[in-house]
Image: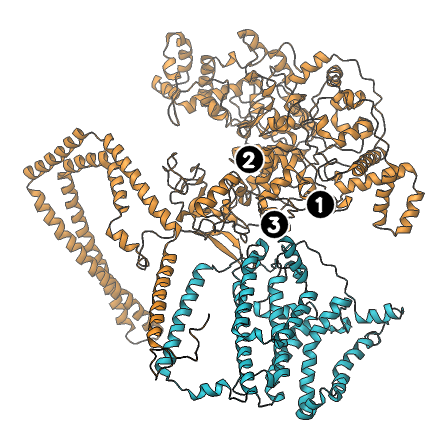
Chain colours: A cyan, B orange
């Protein structure tokens, strides 16, 4: 048992777990079985079994069963349920459409029912049941109050509200200016821009995966991996000093993580050219700027000409294509930076500490 | 939440075609969920209602009623039934008598009723008149302001109303007078009834009180209704009790708020006496020592100080665990968990201190004190903290620990005193040499393991010794030590006072000397012969300050012969293990490694290597010694050359009791996660938190706190202080000792502790440590209980500077030492004694005696045979053939004593100095009232002559008798006689007590010459001479 726990702890280190989750994500999208009832129940069973068995471990229990974290455990299951629900519906429709039959939504729409009593009565029952659940929750789990807030004594780890823990996790890889302002801003802008970028009428009013493969994959990648998964890491796997801890590891306040991150400029000027850092910041950061410039300004143009993307370019027109691609590239910057950090200890591409501008 | 049956393809059999759902089943679901909602609602009400404190209050009500039933029984037993019946009969008889004989009573009652209504009416009229007058006053004021034409009339109307008011007042007062007269008349008539009734009430008073209380505590229907769930918002009899404490603050980081203690919600009887018998268990017990704490009349009344300011814990909590109760041991923890579902509060920064540590709470308000009354454990801790040197390495910013003398000896002349071999062995293991020493063990502790590390430490000790010798004055003592007699030396050791501060015993522990430790003030003198050179010891005994100017060791004014005898005696204790030893040669490889390590902290690797190569062997040792002294902070307790004003190395402890838990490193040690458990372990085993980390940390990073060999009791005492060093803030009005008096007391007490006055004297109830070697109470140095009220400041000042100038108690072998006080120190002592007795330092000159008083004094002096014990001069001593060894000479009195004190001393000596041999001549007939036996005695035929003598001064025998019966006059007369005897207060009014503190040495000498020669007094009293 100990060996398994240690293995899971080892496996859940960000670089392994993140890769694993990405692989699982793509496998999951290809799977058919997973989106059947059997598959869903199996997934639920495995998840619940993992949780229940793990709760016997004192370190796991102390974090997961914390009254603050209970809603986040629920969130994990709810996210899973709703993804499963929509995907199973989509797969069902895909099958129907493949057979040339109308979608089940279409069939349902024709079957009209009354507001009273069918709708109102079922809503009322839900209200009652939900109230019961909330009352029981409030009696059983006491509010986790701590001592009065002390400005001179921040709790360790200091954690954001759970829904921002993904952003806080991003702070590990980006400058606060990027992770706290630019990226969250662009998330909102990007979400607002979706209807204008993606004007395809497919999937309107019915679930489908096959007709919207790329769009759904990109969205789910951002939502499941870059947002939800980061919240899970930030909640359950980040302990004192924001150090990483496996799910069965004790949150030891004295744990020390080596700090060995290096800027791109150092890699280029010192390690590659053995020249020493140029005194002028512009010259010093030139390699990083060229790289970032290439990523944002040259790469999209090249991609537009790539034969796999050319049809999209032609279909969407240059404005939609470039805006969408730019947003996509910004999203991808996060996993790219994460991997560069894990593999090369890269601190920043561009590190202009003179003007607090870091990417 | 999973949705109910999702839309399924197959419709259920009994589903109506126009419905989407099966409503038979929907209704079932609805019914079940509604019932569930009802159930959880009831659960919610119950969960809100069933507070544990309600159970405690209800239980206490039952218990108190049971107690009241017992009390009622007891009260009833006290009352004699027959007596009650008799009194009741009396009341009835009186009533009958009144009714029979004074039929007018009813008449009077009617009259009273009428007058009462008249008074009421007249009062209403008066109020109306007053109101009209006030309104008119405003009208008139307005009329003047606006120059109204009718101002004159308005003024007239005002005058009229004034008269009306006066008339109304008169009318009311007249009726009142009549009413009162009638009432008095009635009371007179009914006097017999009232008196009989009062007797009856008095007899039954206790019972009535019990019955009244029992009525309040009933558990009838009203009780059930008022406390029923959902009904208990009106006025429940079970409710949260609290006391708001505006002067005691809670730090909420952004603001401070007043404490609101709710402890008494469960601890119902905490401030009520009578619930402390063995049958009362917590939380129902009365607070112990109600006179000192919690009680209404105590210095810490419950309504002002509450509970949590002293005990800690969460003030507003009404739940056992949330309040922060801390178990005192594992057994209690287990019991609480089992019985009360106790859980430790991880986020509570200041949990309740476990029982036994409550005295820690004293520090918050008594921070300016040096001795806190009743805080015995805490006081022991204070002593240990200053004497073990805790406060030397750790800054503790409190008055008791500021400006302390370094507890260890000055090491700048160590080479003159001892040898390096001894020093090496001493540093390695001090308690091996002196079992009771406060010097801790720095080396060979549990966290330093392995052979290499053992040799490293040996190298470090040798290096320290090398450094000390290289930085010491090397001048040898050249004066030849005369051969002494060790037997006589031992006698001296026990007789002259050495034993007040020193012991010479092996196989003892410090714990045996708790709680005061006065006799451990100076070093244990066992094995001295193997430690010091004879020349040093001889010179040291004669004058300690020549070797160490700041020492607390006083001079006992030993003659050369005495010093030689004592030297011989002290040197006779030897230990061969410590003789002819040399420090082991340092391991050169390890030494160089350590030296290199220190060099590298400031130099580059290469430069340090070069520097090391240039250092000769001896210099390397000295260099390492210097670094090691810095590493362990030796200079905090010892004066060492080159370490002036170096900051102490310990963590500051001023707010240790508020230190966040995560700042304490528990390492791998499995103990309860509390501050006090951590400190407790740290004190007993200072290096314990390195357990398991010995090989993880680098050698110089291992914990360095030395081991004091504390036992549990010492650790508890120190712990009780340290957990009390908090950041709590309290209002000035709640703090003890913010005035000048306390400051004077604190300064005096610090000095008294530093010079160990209590080794010999009894001060504030503690001391007389020398009792251990002097069994005869009369041979003990004096009790200084009343010193401030007793002696003149000027005299005491001179005496402290030169105790040899006068010998009050020639029979004592113990000598008052010469401490070499500065004027400031002597004045600190004076101010302390004055403050203790609340006396001003100086008196106006003695006003002179009244001739009558002096005449009586002379007679009474003879009558009481004062001179039998008090030598009153050489001639008097010869004439009476008295024993001179009993009491101080009265010839010193006018110079030494305060004239305002002597009469009250003579009146009741035991009150001033309990246990004094001075007899009480005036019996105390009732508290505070004394009788004079002289008035009776003077009539005895044997005193006829004296009476005749006195009658010359008095006009009548009655006047004389009245004088003699007045204790204050008689005692004053005795004082006048004493002043007369010593030439300090004849009828003339010569100044007797000039102020002396301001005098130069020269005038002091002159003044001394003017007084009766103390030497002559002493010689007359004790022909054998004195030391």
Cα distance between the residues tagged 2 and 1: 34 Å
- The chain under label 1 reads B
Position of residue A282 measured from the top left corner of the image (x, y, whole percent):
82, 76
Foreground mark, 2 or 3, reads 3
Q: Mark 1–mark 3 contact, CB under 8 Å?
A: no
- Asked if labels 1 and 3 share a chain, the reply is yes
In the image, residue B977 sits, relative to residue B461, either above or below, namely above
Q: Residues within 10 Å of mark 3 (few under 14, many from 20)?
A: some
Residues flagged by tags 2 and 1 on a common chain: yes
Q: Is residue A240 above or below residue B79?
A: below
User: Which residue: 69% across, 90% down?
Assistant: A311
Q: Which residue is mark 1?
A: B693
Q: Which residue is mark 2?
A: B377
Quarter holding the C terminus of chain B? top right
Of residue B645 and residue B40, the one placed in the foreground of this image is: B40
**x, y percent for residue B133:** 26, 65
Does any portion of residue B152 appear in the rendered image? yes
> Element type at marker 2?
helix
> x, y percentage for residue A106?
48, 88
Secondary structure beneath label 1: loop
Q: Are marks 2 and 1 in contact (CB under 8 Å)?
A: no
| Residue depth check, mark 1 versus mark 3: number of the one nearer the observer | 1
Most distant residue in the front direction: A99
Q: Which residue is mark 3?
A: B659
Specify the quadrant of the image occupied by residue A119. bottom left
Name the quadrant containing residue B447.
Answer: top right
Q: Nearer the viewer, residue B35 or B193?
A: B35
Q: Earlier in the sequence, mark 1 or mark 3?
A: 3
Q: Chain of mark 3?
A: B
Q: CA distance from mark 1 to mark 3?
A: 24 Å
The x and y percentages for residue B364 are 55, 45
Question: Would residue B774 appear left or right of A172 to someone viewing this image?
Answer: left
């Amino acid at each position: 048992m100990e060996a398994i726990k240690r293995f899971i702890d080892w496996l859940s280190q960000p670089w392994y777990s993140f890769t694993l989750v990405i692989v699982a994500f793509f496998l999951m999208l290809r799977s058919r079985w997973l989106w059947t009832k059997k598959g869903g129940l199996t997934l639920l069973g495995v998840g619940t079994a993992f949780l229940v068995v793990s709760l016997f471990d004192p370190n796991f229990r102390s974090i997961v069963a914390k009254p603050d974290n209970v809603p986040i455990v629920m969130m994990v299951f709810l996210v899973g349920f709703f993804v499963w629900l929509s995907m199973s519906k989509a797969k069902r429709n895909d099958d129907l459409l493949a057979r040339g039959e109308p979608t089940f939504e279409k069939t349902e729409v024709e079957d009209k029912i009354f507001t009273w009593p069918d709708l109102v009565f079922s809503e009322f029952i839900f209200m009652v049941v939900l109230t019961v659940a909330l009352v029981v929750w409030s009696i059983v789990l006491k509010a986790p109050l701590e001592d009065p807030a002390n400005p001179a004594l921040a709790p360790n780890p200091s954690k954001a509200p759970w829904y921002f823990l993904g952003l806080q996790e991003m702070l590990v890889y980006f400058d606060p200016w990027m992770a706290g302002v630019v990226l969250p801003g662009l998330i909102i802008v990007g979400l607002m821009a979706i209807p204008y970028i993606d004007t395809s009428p497919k999937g309107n009013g019915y679930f489908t995966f096959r007709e919207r493969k790329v769009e759904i994959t990109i969205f789910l990648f951002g939502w499941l991996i870059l947002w939800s998964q980061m919240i899970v890491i930030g909640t359950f796997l980040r302990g004192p000093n924001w150090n990483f801890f496996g799910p069965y590891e004790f949150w030891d306040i004295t744990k020390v993580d080596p700090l060995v991150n290096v800027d791109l400029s150092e890699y280029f000027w010192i390690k590659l050219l053995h020249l020493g850092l140029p005194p002028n910041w512009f010259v010093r950061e030139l390699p990083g700027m060229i790289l970032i410039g290439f990523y944002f300004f040259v790469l999209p143009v090249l991609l537009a000409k790539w034969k796999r993307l050319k049809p999209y370019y032609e279909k969407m027109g240059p404005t939609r294509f470039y805006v969408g691609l730019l947003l996509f590239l910004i999203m991808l910057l996060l996993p790219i930076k994460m991997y560069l950090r894990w593999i090369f200890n890269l601190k920043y591409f561009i590190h202009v500490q003179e003007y607090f501008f870091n990417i | 939440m999973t949705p109910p049956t999702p839309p399924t393809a197959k419709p259920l059999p009994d589903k109506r075609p126009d419905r989407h759902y099966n409503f038979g089943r929907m209704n079932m679901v609805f019914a079940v969920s509604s019932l569930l909602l009802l159930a959880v609602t009831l659960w919610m009400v119950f969960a809100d209602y069933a507070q544990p404190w309600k159970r405690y209050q209800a239980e206490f009500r039952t218990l108190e009623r049971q107690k009241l039933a017992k009390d009622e029984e007891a009260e009833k037993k006290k009352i004699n039934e027959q007596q009650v019946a008799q009194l009741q009969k009396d009341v009835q008889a009186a009533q009958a008598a009144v009714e029979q004989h004074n039929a007018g009573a009813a008449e009077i009652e009617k009259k009273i009723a009428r007058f009462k209504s008249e008074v009421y009416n007249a009062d209403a009229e008066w109020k109306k008149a007053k109101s009209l007058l006030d309104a008119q006053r405003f009208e008139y004021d307005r009329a003047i302001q606006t120059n109204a034409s009718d101002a004159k009339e308005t003024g007239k109307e005002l005058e009229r109303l004034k008269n009306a008011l006066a008339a109304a007042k008169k009318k009311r007062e007249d009726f009142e007078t009549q009413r009162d007269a009638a009432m008095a008349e009635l009371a007179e008539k009914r006097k017999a009834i009232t008196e009989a009734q009062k007797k009856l009430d008095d007899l039954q008073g206790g019972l009535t009180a019990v019955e009244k209380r029992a009525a309040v505590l009933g558990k009838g229907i009203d009780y059930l209704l008022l406390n029923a769930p959902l009904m208990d918002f009106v006025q429940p009899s079970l409710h949260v009790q609290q006391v708001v404490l505006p002067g005691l603050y809670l730090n909420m980081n952004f603001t401070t708020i007043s404490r609101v203690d709710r402890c008494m919600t469960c601890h119902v009887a905490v401030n009520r006496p009578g619930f402390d018998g063995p049958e009362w268990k917590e939380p129902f017990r009365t607070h112990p020592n109600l006179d000192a704490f919690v009680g209404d009349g105590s210095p810490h009344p419950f309504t002002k100080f509450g509970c949590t300011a002293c005990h800690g814990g969460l003030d507003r909590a009404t739940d056992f665990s949330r309040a922060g109760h801390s178990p005192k041991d594992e057994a209690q923890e287990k019991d609480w968990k089992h019985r009360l579902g106790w859980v430790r509060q991880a986020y509570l920064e200041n949990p309740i201190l476990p029982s036994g540590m409550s005295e820690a709470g004293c520090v918050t308000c008594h921070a300016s004190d040096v001795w806190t009354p009743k805080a015995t454990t805490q006081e022991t801790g204070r002593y240990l903290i200053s004497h073990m040197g805790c406060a030397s390495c750790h800054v503790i910013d409190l008055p008791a620990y500021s400006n302390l003398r370094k507890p260890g000896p000055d090491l700048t002349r160590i080479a003159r005193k001892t040898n390096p071999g001894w020093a090496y062995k001493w540093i390695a293991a001090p308690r091996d040499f002196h079992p009771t020493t406060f010097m801790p063990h720095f080396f060979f502790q549990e966290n330093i393991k392995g052979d290499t590390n053992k040799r490293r430490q040996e190298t470090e000790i040798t290096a320290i010794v090398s450094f000390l010798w290289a930085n010491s004055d090397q001048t040898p003592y050249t004066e030849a030590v005369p051969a002494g007699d060790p037997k006589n030396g031992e006698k001296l050791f026990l007789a002259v006072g050495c034993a007040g501060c020193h012991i010479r015993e092996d196989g003892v522990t410090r714990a045996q000397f708790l709680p005061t430790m006065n006799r451990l003030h100076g070093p244990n003198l066992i094995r001295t012969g193997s430690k010091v050179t004879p020349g040093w010891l001889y010179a040291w005994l004669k004058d300690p300050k020549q070797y160490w100017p700041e020492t607390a060791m006083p001079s006992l004014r030993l003659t050369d012969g005495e010093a030689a005898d004592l030297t011989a005696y002290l040197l006779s204790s030897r230990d061969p293990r410590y003789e002819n030893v040399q420090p082991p040669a340092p391991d050169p490889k390890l030494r160089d490694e350590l030296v290199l390590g220190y060099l590298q902290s400031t130099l580059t690797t290469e430069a340090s290597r070069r520097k090391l190569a240039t250092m000769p062997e001896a210099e390397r040792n000295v260099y390492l010694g210097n670094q090691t002294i810095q590493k362990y902070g030796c200079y905090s307790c010892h004066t060492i050359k080159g370490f002036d004003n170096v900051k102490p190395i310990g963590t500051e402890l001023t707010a240790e009791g508020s230190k966040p838990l995560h700042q304490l490193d528990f390492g791998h040690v499995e103990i309860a996660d509390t501050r006090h458990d951590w400190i407790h372990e740290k004190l007993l085993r200072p290096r314990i938190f390195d357990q398991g980390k010995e090989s993880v940390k680098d050698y110089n990073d291992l914990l360095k706190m030395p081991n004091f060999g504390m036992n549990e009791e010492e650790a508890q005492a120190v712990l009780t202080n340290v957990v009390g060093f908090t950041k709590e803030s309290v209002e000035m009005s709640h703090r003890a000792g913010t005035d000048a008096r306390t400051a004077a007391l604190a300064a005096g007490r610090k000095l008294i502790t530093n010079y160990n006055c209590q080794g010999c004297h009894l001060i504030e109830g503690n001391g007389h440590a020398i009792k251990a070697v002097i069994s005869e109470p009369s041979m003990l140095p004096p009790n200084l209980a009343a010193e401030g009220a007793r002696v003149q400041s000027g005299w005491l000042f001179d005496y402290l500077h030169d105790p040899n100038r006068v010998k009050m108690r020639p029979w004592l072998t113990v000598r008052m030492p010469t401490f070499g006080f500065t004027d400031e120190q002597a004045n600190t002592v004076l101010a302390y004694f004055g403050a203790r007795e609340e006396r001003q330092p100086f008196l106006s000159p003695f006003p002179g005696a009244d001739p009558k008083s002096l005449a009586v004094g002379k007679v009474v002096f003879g009558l009481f045979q004062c001179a039998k014990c008090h030598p009153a001069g050489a001639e008097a001593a010869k004439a009476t053939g008295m024993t001179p060894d009993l009491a101080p000479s009265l010839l010193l009195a006018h110079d030494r004593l305060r004239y305002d004190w002597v009469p009250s001393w003579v009146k009741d000596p035991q009150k001033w100095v309990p246990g004094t041999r001075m007899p009480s001549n005036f019996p105390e007939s009732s508290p505070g009232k004394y009788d004079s036996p002289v008035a009776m005695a003077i009539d005895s035929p044997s005193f006829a002559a004296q009476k005749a003598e006195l009658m010359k001064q008095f006009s009548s025998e009655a006047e004389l008798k009245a004088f003699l019966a007045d204790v204050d006059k008689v005692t004053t007369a005795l004082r006048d006689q004493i002043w007369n005897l010593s030439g300090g207060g004849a009828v003339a009014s010569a100044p007797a007590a000039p102020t002396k503190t301001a005098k130069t040495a020269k005038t002091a000498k002159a003044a001394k010459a003017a007084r009766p020669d103390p030497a002559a007094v002493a010689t007359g009293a004790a022909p054998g001479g004195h030391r």
